[in-house]
Image: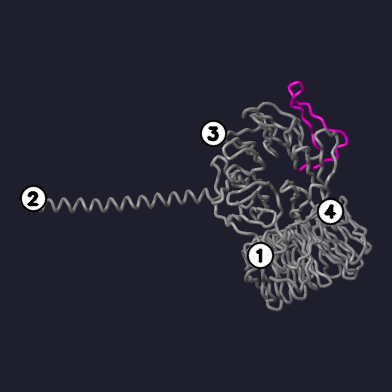
Amino acid sequence: MIPVSKWQWVVGAAVLVAAVAGGMAIREAARTLQRSRQELQAEHEFDFTLSQYAPPQNTHFEPVRSPEVFQRLARFRDNLYIAGPAGLSEYDSRGNFLREFPAGSYLPGSPIIAMEAGQMSGASRPELILSTADAGILAFDGERFRQIYPANPEIRAITTILPASGGKLLIGTKKHGVLLYDGSSIRELHSTLDHLYVQALAGTETDLWVGTLDQGVKHWHAGTTESFGEEEGLPDRQVQAVALAGDKTYVGTPLGVAEFDGGRFSRVLAKGTLVTSLFRGNELLVGTEEQGVLHVPLSAGQRPAAHSKLPATPLDEVQQIAGTEDSVLVLTRTGVYSQRASGLAWQQVLKPRESVIKDRNVSALAIDKDGRLWVGYFDRGLDILPAGPGRVQHVENDHVFCVNRILPDARGNSIEVATANGLVRFGPSGTPEQILGRADGLIADHVTDVAPYRDGLAVATPAGITFLDSEGARSMYSFHGLVNNHVYALAASDDELLAGTLGGLSALQKGFVKSNFTAGNSGLKQNWITAVALVGDEWMIGTYGSGVMALDSTGHIHPFEVATAPVEINPNAMLVTKDHVFAGTLSQGMYVYDRAKQRWSVVKDGLPSQNVTAFAAGAGFLYVGTDNGLVRIQENLIQP
């Protein structure tokens, strides 16, 4: 028999082992639970930095004044602020311009898309809160800017903001629905409001109406979310604006306004109206795309669907309607209008300042032999700027509309303009003289690029290449060996022509395909080729997704440090000068190659947008076109 004392020792040891094992299991379970909580928190909270915003210094870029586009207005510290793609402008109460904060040179190179006045957590006083297209949120106290910069680019894709109680800020996004910023974190407001493309917010963080791009309107309250679409009475599932007044909610869509009473659908007002904004005063004011401001009576004695437009209303493309103590302000893309409470007409109180060029969305640039700057637009034709004093000439018609490339003839006899509606030949005076399309021998009407080749021209289209020379027009496509029919870019040297296509790169000799390069048979990392340029004895190749690569004289393709990266080079956004090569990207500014040092670098500061679309160089200046305006810089002052 085992003595009792020994039994006690055995039992005690067993209990101790069990306790240790149990403790280890509890600690491991606690660690697992903590990891799970952290992982769950990471899924619903988003990293960000909060810091004082310091404008870029000594960028040396000079803006070529583009048209101001008014998108948002706000009253702050007794002054009026106007925000838009150009940046932020401040005016006094009488509409006198005071100062501006341009996008790119003072503010981040990203358009402002939303603006509200409020006091966020951590601020000692109210601020002007601005959200940008992709550079986060800025808070302006009248003297300095703070920046809230989410680490995730998708969280920076903000569409609207709404100050809430306790210093909180509600944030609408394109992909992550509604977020809440409380000064210490950015997190989802609720899982039922995630994965939405938000277009409008109204209410509070506990009782919120959320207008979406394609899922109707959501009502978050009492811990639940109700959804309203066309089946529930909404005129359209795309929501443009939301306004609240007591128990009433008004939801604007492209087909009219839905009224909700106590959270329940009631009726449709202003049927068939393309609504852009809403304001609820004594009556409902409905901002529209083409009908100005509609006054919708809401009195019980009047017909619910009745609406009227005041006579002589000069309002189009209404962006916002805001109330003041004694009047209503209406913001359009081209001005601010006011109407007194007792008035019957709108009075313009503010208009954009004069601009040099006609549009902000630049798609092509060139300088001709006379030093004139040609500026092509994505959908507004082109401008011709004189080298000295003189009038800017604007050309816009059914053919000169969407400009893809501008090619001045080396002898100065003509300027070829590649457009989505044909190849337009301009004379030396800047007047269109000839339009070439399919009826004239081109393989397609849509011309993506044009290059001088041998004794004529090579014309790129989505259907192949057309050669124009003294013998007439002849075309080639994949049947003749071209790697792909959709040609984006051309570059030539003597008898050699390189064609960048959707399916790879084709090298032609004397008009015939010599070799094809694809991601499958060469060092190319992408088949989609958007730009080609000859640099010394090798070709630089811009790709849509892998940056810039090179084709050397031995027929080998090799990458670059820095420039060969997961970056989209914009179509034909490449320029070679004596000292540099420039490549414009879709979202990362411009890549700069120092030909002497054989080194690439990236320039972002000073640009009005990181979407760089075109270049031109002349008289020592580099002109840089973006989707948000045009700037220039002395080439020798470029600082990568």
| The magenta stretch spans residue 444 | no
| Image quarter in which the C terminus is found | bottom right
Q: Position of residue 592 (x, y in %)?
A: 70, 70
Q: Which residue is mark 2?
A: 4
Q: Earlier in the sequence, mark 2 or mark 4?
A: 2
- Residue lying at 82% horizontally and 30% vertically, measured from the top left: 308
Instruction: Quadrant for residue 299, please give it.
Output: top right
* Above or below 149: residue 521: below
Q: CA distance from mark 1 to mark 4?
A: 38 Å
| The magenta stretch spans residue 303 | yes
Are circles 3 and 2 on residues that touch, CB within 8 Å? no
Instruction: Quadrant for residue 271, please give it.
Output: top right
Q: Which residue is mark 3?
A: 222
**As shown in the figure, which amino acid type bears the numbered disc 3?**
Ala
Are circles 2 and 4 on residues that touch, CB within 8 Å? no
* Between 212 and 495, the one nearer to me in the picture: 212
Label 4: state its secondary structure. loop
Instruction: Quadrant for residue 627, please give it.
Output: bottom right
Q: Position of residue 450 (x, y in %)?
A: 81, 63
